[in-house]
Image (tube, helix red, strand yellow):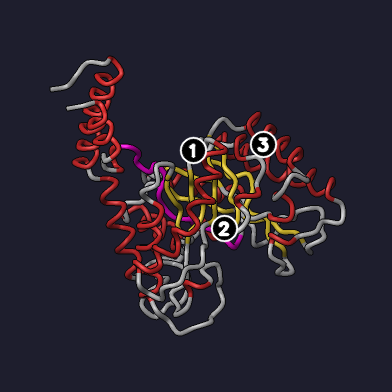
Amino acid sequence: MTKAAILAALLLLPAAARATPAIYGFTFPSWWKDSYDQPAAKTSLANLAKTGAKWVALIPVQYMKRKDSTTFDVTDQTASDESLRRTIRDAKALGLSVVLKPHVNCADGTPTAVIRPRDERAWFASYREFLLHYATIAREERVELFVVGTELFSMAAGPVHEREWQELIGGVRAVYPGKLTYAANWYDFALIPFWRSLDYVGIDGYFPAVGGKHPRLMAASLRAYLPAIRAVVHASGKPLLFTEVGIASQRGANRKPWSYRDFGPVDAGVQKAYFEAFLDAFSRERSFAGFIQWCWDLNPDAGGPNDKSMTVQGKPALDVLEKYFAGLNAPALDARAAETAGAARKALAVVEAGVPVE
């Protein structure tokens, strides 16, 4: 066999031999101070673990009063620190790794992407205090991944505030020793200037796609985003993590997967097809490190065939994800990947040594 033939064969190795996604699971957001502590939430977390998911993202939320506010408030809608710590420990006892993903929301309903603090310096000072508080919890509870921001387009995209973000990231790294990412919007990830200072390129992947509930058509539509994603990943040298991906169970939801509104009749097939298309389009990428689905509800009885929300509980889309998780968790797959990777290393060593292979 010639060197060229060996190298050609190596390029055709299955994706599992080249890279296996390390992060796959669900977000598990809290919208009330003690909701994580409720028995129903504990049951729901256990159900999440039974899907084969290996990660859960916990999401405490603090609030700006208006889009021009400069400080954040703990409200009755903010998960208490005690409940957050207990839930981290519960998740780990179930064998789950944990993402801590603190969010800032506006109490007046303004999307976080378009906030305009009246004093940006004061806002960043408040945000630093907010972030270091949760980074300290992440360190003390041995959380595996910490998210330094989510969908803060007006405060993070472009070069204007890069220095402030570099200082924030440095401050978090001084407190927390684990991996870091930022959760960019699907439309602004290419404008984030500080990816090289993080461990993953994080994208909240609510990409619109044409194709109704036809997964192949939707996958072709989603692949249109790959050139931009690959450019960012290449420039940063960091793997790709979808920090959120989700879609409602409604007709037409594929055109605006980020939307929570009721805009069409219930259609679980759209949600199922979108996840099939998402995995088809992105999971074969060499840089693909995994995804976190938005969201798993704290109510174990949530979802079902008549539910329009983004949860996959009790819906066909969950079958798609469980099948994918099972493939990642299968020992036979790991063994085959290791065997193939070992053969590839030996073949490359031969090529580099210049020894002909018979």
Q: Nearer the viewer, residue 187 or 43?
A: 187
List x then y, in percent, for residue 157.
70, 50
List x then y, in percent, for residue 224.
48, 59
Residue 5 drawn in magenta: no
Q: Is residue 325 visible?
A: yes
List x then y, in percent, for residue 82.
58, 47
* Of labels 1 and 3, the one closer to you: 3
- Label 2 sits on residue: 186
The amino acid type of the residue labelled 2 equals Trp
- The structure residue drawn at horizontal position 55% and vertical position 51%, both measured from the top left corner, is 83
Q: Nearer the viewer, residue 61 or 140?
A: 61
Q: Is residue 26 left or right of residue 15?
A: right
- Label 1 sits on residue: 144
The amino acid type of the residue labelled 3 equals Ile
For marks 3 and 2, give the CA distance.
21 Å
Q: Is residue 298 above or below residue 210?
A: above
Contact check, label 2 and label 1, Cβ < 8 Å: no
Count of marks placed on residues: 3
Tag 1: Cα neighbours inside 10 Å, few (<14), some, or many (≥20)? some
- The structure residue drawn at horizontal position 32% and vertical position 37%, both measured from the top left corner, is 18
Q: Nearer the viewer, residue 45 or 244?
A: 244
The amino acid type of the residue labelled 1 equals Glu
Q: Is residue 2 left or right of residue 51?
A: left
- The structure residue drawn at horizontal position 41% and vertical position 76%, both measured from the top left corner, is 212
Start-end of magenta stretch? 18-32
Contact check, label 3 and label 2, Cβ < 8 Å: no
Contact check, label 1 and label 3, Cβ < 8 Å: no
* Image mark for residue 169: 3
Q: Residue 195 is drawn in which quadrant?
A: top right
The C terminus, quarter of image: top left
Q: Sequence order check: which comes first, mark 3 or mark 2?
A: 3
Q: Residue 304 is drawn in which quadrant?
A: bottom left
